[in-house]
Amino acid sequence: MRISIAKGGAVAAAAFATLALGAAPSGAATSTLQRAACDGTRTQFSFLAPFSGTCFKGHGDLDSPMTLPSWKPGPWRAGQNTGWFSYNDANGVEQRVSFTEGQTGDAPYRNIKHLHID
């Protein structure tokens, strides 16, 4: 019995796909941390500003998650997330704020340097 090149290629592709799925890291089911449109639910991490908010979804790290250097967020809400964010205080000393699921807090009104969500 002969296998055509097309069939052999399809079999090889299927085998490769199966191996690739098996090699995926355990955290592959979660998404990478990124800015997101605020969806109105309390699942996202968000910084609130006087007239708008900036929300994040997924897990991981973002350096300088705010794209506007003059944008200094107001209060924050952890949503269903744990993690931390850092900023420089008025004296230029880096401060870190840790948060747990459901926690809210008063914002530093400083530029956020780093955001980490577990």
Image (cartoon, helix red, strand yellow):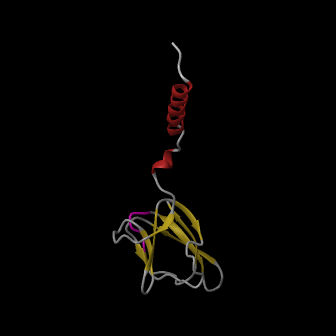
Q: Which residues are magenta?
A: 77-81
Q: Is residue 68 magenta?
A: no
Which residue is depicted at the point 52% across and 42% down? 24
- Residue 12 percent across, percent down from the top left: 55, 29
Q: Nearer the viewer, residue 80 or 50?
A: 50
Q: Nearer the viewer, residue 16 or 44?
A: 16
User: Chief secondary structure of the magenta span?
Assistant: loop
State how many labels appear: 0
Which residue is depicted at the point 50% across and 81% down? 73
Left or right of 40 in this view: 86: right
Q: Quadrant of residue 42?
A: bottom left
Q: Please tell me whether residue 23 is drawn above or below residue 55 in the rendered image.
A: above
Q: Is residue 78 magenta?
A: yes
- Residue 96 percent across, percent down from the top left: 56, 72
Which residue is depicted at the point 54% across and 25% down? 8
Q: Residue furthest left?
A: 41
Q: Nearer the viewer, residue 6 or 11?
A: 6
- Residue 76 percent across, percent down from the top left: 44, 76
Which residue is depicted at the point 42% across and 86% down? 51
Q: Please tell me whether residue 10 is drawn above or below residue 73 in the rendered image.
A: above
Left or right of 88 in this view: 44: left
